[in-house]
Image (cartoon, rainbow, N blue to C red):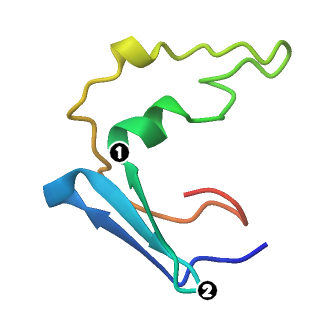
């Protein structure tokens, strides 16, 4: 699996910009990333049911900090 070469929180456009070694750049809105969170608080570990209601997530959600967590999470 490739690791990003750079991750930028583009607050003006309310998204993350993720650069990859192959030159590709992915842009993911803060809102979309929050709604798709796979953690145990947002998705039941037992049933796989989504517990987080995307309608309850504010469009103005934004990160307060950005850190890598383990080998796979931001």
What residue is drawn where x is 72% and y is 13%? 49
Report the Cα–Cα distance between label 1 and label 2.
Answer: 23 Å
The residue that disc 1 covers is 30
- Quarter of the image with the N terminus is bottom right
Look at the numbered disc 1 and give the secondary structure of its residue.
helix
Q: Which mark is residue 68?
A: none
From the top left corner, tell me how far across and down residue 54 is, in percent: 43, 18
The image position of residue 59, as x and y in percent, is 24, 29
The image quadrant that residue 10 belongs to is bottom left
Residue at point 72%, 77% (across, down): 2
- In the image, residue 10 sits, relative to residue 2, either above or below, namely above
Q: Earlier in the sequence, mark 1 or mark 2?
A: 2
Q: Is residue 47 left or right of residue 9?
A: right
- Decide if residue 34 is on the left or right side of residue 12: right
Query: In this rendering, would 45 be left or right of 30?
Result: right
The residue lying furthest to the left in this view is 12
Image point 60% across, 13% down: which residue? 51
Name the image quarter holding the C terminus. bottom right
Query: Which label belongs to residue 22?
Result: 2
- Quarter occupied by residue 9: bottom left
């Amino acid at each position: 699996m490739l690791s990003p070469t750079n991750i930028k929180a583009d607050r003006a456009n309310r998204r993350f910009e993720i650069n990859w070694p192959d030159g590709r750049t992915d842009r993911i809105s803060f809102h979309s990333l929050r709604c798709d969170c796979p953690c145990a608080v947002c998705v039941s570990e037992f049933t796989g049911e989504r517990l987080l209601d995307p309608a309850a997530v504010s469009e103005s959600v934004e990160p307060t900090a950005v850190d890598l967590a383990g080998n796979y999470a931001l």
